[in-house]
Every structure is written in structure tokens, then in C-alpha cells.
Image (cartoon, rainbow, N blue to C red):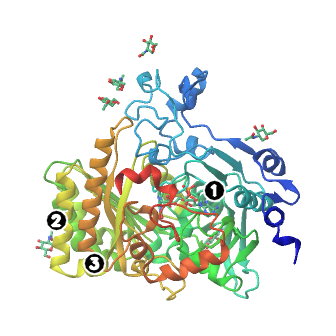
């Protein structure tokens, strides 16, 4: 007979055992926010909404507004730099607001940010924003954050530039790990991934570096980084981990084709190098499996090219109710030819800005002659010119041409495979889709970014294999005004869902770029990752055994998880 037969003693032993194994006592420190804050040098802060200084009530409590700070927010409301440089700055309002609860937000009037009605006698609410953030400076910060999340049950999010269209860099009640201030840059003409022997001409950037900074750094070193069409999108975060397209991708591949090494803190608490020779499973997962899932990337290394001479074409004409479809008809009929000629770029209903590193100016003029003639016949204009390298093209076209921010803007795109352009039926379907879009008052938006000429090593990346036969990415958008009612929001999303379903039917067996896909995609596992999904889940479980990282339709996410609440009205 042992003492354990006494039920009270049994309970006591059980309690003691629970206390000993309880992770609440991490490294001898009690698991609470003040202690975590001390461990991280006081860098844990409450996260206040971007537009709060304009309001005099915050979450139901009176607060003092700040006229000067408000004026500067009103002035910079659409400036991506003002947003990306702060922990609370998001490009798209759906990342700030709780979309399912119209009054749960802290927004200005996006048709006129100076309109004081938006913030007078109105409560500024937290929406879907994190409650706190930690500015990441060191590897130990991330390790401590994972420990703290594990012992306290606090949910985490990772916030870099705040461009995510699916709300995956914010999240109600989360602690945001904010990476913008990791800003190292290094150029090495003979970079060797740790433990490997191959050498690469490569640039390494800290996770906070964005394209504007990386392009300037590459130019200074006389090389070309293949990257996105927006100055403030981050290089190492959601862009590269999710796929990462460039208008140079048709010739030089996607971001995931060019990354050669990551340094990352995984949620199991280890700082790791991931490349082809070390943790190759993790490296594969980080080449398309998506941001916010496998750990916090601290830096990434990307192969670069020498300076690339480019020919660029900019075509535009004033839009009329009848002149867009004939323009798109010419575009659709020439797409396969243009793909073979190395063209990449962006086409809308009445504009085209494309580049090719493979053509001379006279070849380019010949290639585009029909579309140029059409634009001119509509009172438009065309410029076809040569650039000695990417950077002057970037300065002339990209800095002014990026997609607008400070608005609610969902995108629902899908990859359009070559096969669609190869048959009369496929081309007709596309034209029919564009006709429908125009009827709804939307403008077609076509990134020509499929890696059509890139010599892909089969199986080397984990994004949807549909990329490898894609020429275009296109689809629909949805947006609503700052003060839209729930009914209006539901209508917009419902139209987007119908249109993306329709578009999926005319792009059969294709998939979508998860970072620019509809958040309401039903077959998201299949569409965003195809056959790679199950393997990605097992890698996720290996490096994040306690499921400390979770985001909307990220690998391992399941329907009905609590982080879905702000989209719950639309599913
Ligand atoms: C105006 C605009 C222009 C765009 N242009 C392009 C383009 O030209 N090409 C293209 O391919 N895409 C483009 N995108 C899409 C863009 O690549 C995605 O929104 C991408 O997710 C942004 O990544 P981020 O790290 O900059 O942003 P964030 O919103 O901060 O993060 C995005 C996701 O990555 C995760 N994440 C961020 N940092 C890390 C990190 N260090 N470690 C692990 N996870 C991290 C976040 O948790 C989140 O899930 C554009 C988007 C916008 C709004
Ligand atoms: C963390 O500590 C700093 C410095 O003491 C302090 O300013 C900050 O308010 C603390 N954060 C929280 C969430 O209490
Ligand atoms: C401000 O917004 C309100 C709606 O809330 C609108 O009625 C009013 O016309 C707007 N004023 C200006 C100057 O834009
Ligand atoms: C705001 O509320 C106060 C008190 O209810 C009222 O006196 C004032 O007229 C209101 N202002 C506006 C612009 O609605
Ligand atoms: C820059 O690179 C180009 C192409 O690789 C080369 O011709 C040129 O000499 C380089 N310029 C400098 C200053 O190194
Ligand atoms: C495009 O090709 C279709 C046949 O698939 C043809 O009917 C149409 O006239 C062509 N359009 C242009 C502008 O050449
Ligand atoms: C929303 O605000 C705009 C001004 O930005 C105004 O014209 C419109 O009437 C408002 N809509 C609702 C539903 O209040």
C-alpha cells in the first residue's frame, strides 16, 4: 500500500507534476508580458491603429486627439512609405478593419482623408489589428517570443511591410513580430550557401529590406536583383516565400527560383540555415509554401544577374466604352508570340507597360506594331525605348506605377496557362471573361509574369506547379468604401467569389499565386499548392510542433480556426 492511494495526496502529486512540466516557468522566469518585455529589452509595445491620432475615442474610452499627427496622417494616407515604416501600417484596409463588423475599425474617409466626419464622434476600434508588437532586432528576440507564445498561449503574427491582401500579417489579439528594422545588405559575387559548394553571384538582405532599398543596393553593386513591382514590398517575407513574381520572371524565373539560402528561427526555438545542403526540406517549404508559416526569416540570399539591357514599351490610350475589348483581343492573340520574345509587364484595359531583355528596339517595335497602331488609332500614344539596366526603368515606371494603397482592396487572381491561348475556345473564354468584367465596371489587370522561358528544375520549389505552364496572372478585384455596410461588403465579396469561380472554370487544372488569390477560395489547398500540400503540412508539423504560427489559409490551417473571425461573414 502506498501513500498514493490517498486521493488528496494523489491530487497533490498530480499538481506538482503539472507545475514542474508546465512551460509557464521559462528559464526560471514567470511567463507574463512584463517579464517577456524585460527579456526583449522593453521592445514590446501596444499596437495603436494608424489613424488613431485623429480620433478622440479609442475602444470606447475618451482619448486626446493630436491635430498635427492627424494632419500628417491625412496628408500621407495613400503613401506606402508612411505605412510600411510603422508596426501599425498596412497597405490594404482589410488588414486593419474587422471586415465582418463594419464599426470595428479605425479608418479615415478614403475618398477624402481630410473629411472630419469620419473621425468626429466616432470610436476608433482595433479591428483585426494585433494588440501588441515586438520590434525584432536579434535572433534571441524571436526565440524568446516563441517561448512566450508557447507558455502563455498568446497568438503570434509576423508583420514586415504590411502588403498582404489576405490579412495574414495582422490578426486580432496577436503579438506581431515586426521585422522592418532588420536592414542588413550584403553583396557577394561568389556566395557559397553554407555547407554547399556551388557559388552564386548573390545579394543577402535582412528581412526588413524592401525592393526600393534592394534595387538601389543592387545598382550600387552593378548587378540586377529580380523582384516585385512595388517599392515597399519586402524581399524576404511573403513575396519570396510565397512565390514572388517579377516582370523579368518570364526570362529569369520567380523569386523562389532565385533564392539560395534563408536564415530563419523556427518555432521549435532553433536558429537555422536552410539551403539545398542544410535543412533542405525546410528550404523547399520556404520556396513557395508561404510566409508566416515555418518560422521568422531573418535574412535571405538571392542570385542576381549582371546589368541587363532592356527594351521597354509603354502604350496607353483614352478609354471609351467600346475600345477596350478590341485592344484586349489583339493582346490575347499575340500573347504566345510575346511570351516567346521574353516580354513581361502589366496590361490593363487601356495601358501596357512591358519589358523584354531579349529584343532590340526595332524588334520590339515590330513585335508590338499592331497594338501600337491600335492605341494610336484611339488617340493614344506609345513609347518604345531602351534602358541600359533595370534601375532607370524602375525609377521611370515602377516608383509611380505601383498599385494604390490606403484602400480596401481584395484580389482574386488565377494563373492563366499557355493552353488557354492555344485554342480559339480558350481565347474566346478569356474575351468573354473580360467583357463580363467591363460590364461590372472593373478594369482588367494582367501581370504578365509567368516564368515561360525559365529553365526550371522540376520539383525544386513548393508553390503550385501551375506556375510552370502559366503565362499570365489575372482575375478580379473587390473593394468597398471606408464606411460600407455589411450588406455592401457581402455583395462585393459575393461577386468576387462568383467571378473567381467562373475564371477557375476557364483555366482548368491551373492554380493561383496564394499571395494574390481570393481569400475566399474554397479549394485553396489544391489551387495554391497542388500536390505539394501534404508534404508542406508534414514539414510545418516538424518545425512548428506546437502550432505557434497560424494564418488565414496558410499551410496547416483548418476551417473554423479562431483567426478566421473577421472574414466569417463571407465564407
Ligand atoms: C501594392 C502591392 C504590390 C504588389 N506587387 C507584387 C509584385 O510585383 N510581385 C509579387 O509577387 N507580389 C506582389 N504583391 C504581393 C506581395 O508579394 C504579397 O502581399 C506579400 O505577401 C508581401 O510580403 P511582405 O513580407 O512584404 O508583407 P507582409 O504583409 O508584412 O507579410 C506577408 C506575409 O509574409 C509573412 N512574413 C513577413 N515577413 C516574414 C518573415 N520575415 N518571416 C516569415 N514570414 C514573414 C507574414 O506573416 C504574412 O503572412 C504586391 C502587393 C501589393 C499590396
Ligand atoms: C515594455 O517596456 C518598455 C520600457 O520599459 C515600456 O515603455 C513599454 O510600455 C512596455 N510594454 C508594455 C506592453 O508594457
Ligand atoms: C464626409 O463623409 C460624410 C459621410 O460620412 C459625407 O456625407 C460627406 O459628404 C463627406 N464630406 C466631405 C467633405 O467629403
Ligand atoms: C458630437 O457629439 C456632441 C455631443 O453629443 C455634439 O454636441 C456634436 O454636435 C457632435 N458633433 C458632430 C460633428 O456630430
Ligand atoms: C557593370 O557591369 C557591366 C555589365 O556586366 C560591365 O560592362 C561594366 O563594366 C560594369 N561597370 C562597373 C563600373 O563595374
Ligand atoms: C484574334 O483571333 C481570332 C481567332 O481566334 C480572330 O477571330 C480575331 O479576329 C483575332 N483578332 C485580331 C484583332 O486579330
Ligand atoms: C460613405 O461616405 C461617403 C463619403 O466618403 C458618402 O458619400 C456616403 O454616403 C457614405 N455612405 C454611407 C453608407 O454612409
Name the N-terminal-most of marks 2 and 1.
1
Q: Residue 508 bears which disc, if any?
A: 3
- Residue 569: which disc? none
Percent across and percent down for residue 246 are 47, 67
Question: Could you say which is closer to the camera, residue 355 or residue 52?
Answer: 52
Q: Nearer the viewer, residue 397 or 210?
A: 210
User: In terms of secondary structure, where does tag 1 sit?
Assistant: strand
Establish whether ligand 6 lies closer than 8 Å to the Cβ of label 3: no
Location of mark 2 (residue): 432
Of 184 and 3, the residue lying toward us: 3
What distance separates the C-alpha of mark 2 from that of mark 3?
16 Å
Residue 167: image x %, image y %?
Answer: 49, 54
Label 3 neighbourhood size at 10 Å, few (<14), some (14-19), many (20+)? Answer: few
The vertical placement of 524 against 146, above or below, is below
| Distance from the alpha carbon under mark 3 to that under mark 1 | 36 Å
Of pointers 3 and 1, the one earlier in the residue sequence: 1
| Picture quadrant of ligand 5 | bottom right
The residue at the point 58 percent across, 54 percent down is 212
**How many angstroms separate mark 2 from mark 1 (CA)?**
43 Å
SS class of the residue under badge 2? helix
Point out the frontmost of discs 3 and 1: 1
Say left or right for 571 vs 295.
left
Q: How many marks?
A: 3
Q: Which residue is mark 1?
A: 156
Measured from the top left, where is residue 208 in percent x and y? 66, 56
The local secondary structure at tag 3 comes to loop
Quadrant position of the N terminus in the picture: bottom right
- Residue drawn at (41%, 22%), measured in percent from left and top? 117
In terms of image quadrants, where is residue 444? Answer: bottom left
Amino acid at each position: 500500500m502506498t501513500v498514493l492511494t490517498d486521493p488528496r495526496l494523489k491530487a497533490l502529486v498530480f499538481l506538482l507534476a503539472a507545475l514542474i512540466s508546465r512551460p509557464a516557468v521559462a528559464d526560471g522566469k514567470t511567463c507574463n508580458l512584463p517579464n517577456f518585455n524585460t527579456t526583449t529589452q522593453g521592445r514590446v509595445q501596444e499596437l495603436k491603429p494608424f489613424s488613431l491620432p485623429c480620433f478622440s475615442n479609442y475602444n470606447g474610452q475618451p482619448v486626446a486627439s493630436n491635430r498635427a499627427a492627424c494632419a500628417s496622417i491625412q496628408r500621407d494616407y495613400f503613401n506606402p512609405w508612411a505605412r510600411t515604416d510603422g508596426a501599425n501600417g498596412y497597405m490594404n484596409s482589410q488588414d486593419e478593419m474587422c471586415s465582418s463588423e463594419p464599426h470595428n475599425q479605425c479608418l479615415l474617409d478614403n475618398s477624402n482623408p481630410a473629411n472630419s466626419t469620419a473621425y468626429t464622434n466616432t470610436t476608433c476600434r482595433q479591428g483585426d489589428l494585433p494588440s501588441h508588437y515586438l520590434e525584432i532586432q536579434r535572433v534571441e528576440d524571436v526565440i524568446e517570443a516563441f517561448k512566450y507564445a508557447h507558455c502563455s498561449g498568446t497568438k503570434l503574427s509576423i508583420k514586415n511591410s504590411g502588403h498582404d491582401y489576405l490579412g495574414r500579417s495582422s490578426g486580432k489579439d496577436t503579438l506581431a513580430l515586426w521585422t522592418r528594422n532588420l536592414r542588413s545588405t550584403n553583396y557577394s559575387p561568389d556566395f557559397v550557401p553554407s555547407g554547399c559548394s556551388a557559388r552564386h553571384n548573390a545579394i543577402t538582405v535582412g528581412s526588413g529590406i524592401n525592393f526600393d532599398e534592394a534595387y538601389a543596393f543592387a545598382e550600387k553593386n552593378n548587378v540586377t536583383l529580380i523582384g516585385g513591382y512595388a517599392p515597399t514590398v519586402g524581399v524576404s517575407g511573403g513575396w519570396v516565400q510565397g512565390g514572388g513574381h517579377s516582370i523579368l520572371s518570364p526570362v529569369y524565373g520567380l523569386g523562389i527560383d532565385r533564392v539560395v539560402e534563408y536564415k530563419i528561427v523556427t518555432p521549435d526555438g532553433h536558429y537555422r540555415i536552410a539551403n539545398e545542403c542544410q535543412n533542405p526540406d525546410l528550404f523547399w517549404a520556404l520556396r513557395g509554401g508561404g510566409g508566416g508559416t515555418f518560422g521568422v526569416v531573418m535574412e535571405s540570399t538571392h542570385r542576381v544577374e549582371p546589368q541587363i539591357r532592356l527594351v521597354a514599351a509603354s502604350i496607353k490610350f483614352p478609354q471609351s466604352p467600346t475600345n477596350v475589348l478590341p485592344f484586349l483581343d489583339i493582346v490575347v492573340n499575340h500573347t504566345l508570340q510575346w511570351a516567346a520574345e521574353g516580354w513581361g509587364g502589366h496590361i490593363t484595359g487601356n495601358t501596357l507597360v512591358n519589358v523584354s531583355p531579349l529584343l532590340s528596339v526595332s524588334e520590339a517595335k515590330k513585335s508590338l506594331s499592331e497594338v501600337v497602331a491600335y492605341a494610336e488609332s484611339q488617340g493614344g500614344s506609345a513609347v518604345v525605348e531602351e534602358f541600359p539596366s533595370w534601375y532607370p526603368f524602375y525609377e521611370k515606371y515602377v516608383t509611380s506605377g505601383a498599385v494604390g494603397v490606403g484602400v480596401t482592396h481584395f484580389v482574386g487572381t488565377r494563373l492563366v496557362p499557355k493552353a488557354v491561348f492555344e485554342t480559339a475556345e480558350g481565347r474566346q473564354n478569356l474575351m468573354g471573361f473580360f467583357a463580363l468584367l467591363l460590364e461590372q465596371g472593373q478594369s482588367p489587370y494582367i501581370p504578365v509574369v509567368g516564368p515561360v522561358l525559365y529553365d526550371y528544375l522540376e520539383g525544386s520549389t513548393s508553390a503550385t506547379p501551375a506556375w510552370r505552364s502559366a503565362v499570365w496572372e489575372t482575375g478580379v478585384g473587390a473593394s468597398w468604401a471606408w464606411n460600407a455596410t455589411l450588406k455592401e461588403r457581402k455583395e462585393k465579396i459575393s461577386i468576387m467569389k462568383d467571378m473567381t469561380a467562373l475564371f477557375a472554370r476557364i483555366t482548368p487544372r491551373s492554380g493561383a499565386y496564394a499571395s494574390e488569390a481570393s481569400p475566399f477560395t474554397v479549394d485553396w489547398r489544391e489551387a495554391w499548392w497542388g500536390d505539394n500540400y501534404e508534404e508542406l503540412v508534414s514539414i510545418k508539423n516538424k518545425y512548428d510542433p506546437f502550432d505557434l504560427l497560424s494564418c488565414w489559409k496558410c499551410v496547416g490551417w483548418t476551417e473554423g480556426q479562431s483567426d478566421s473571425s473577421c472574414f466569417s461573414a463571407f465564407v
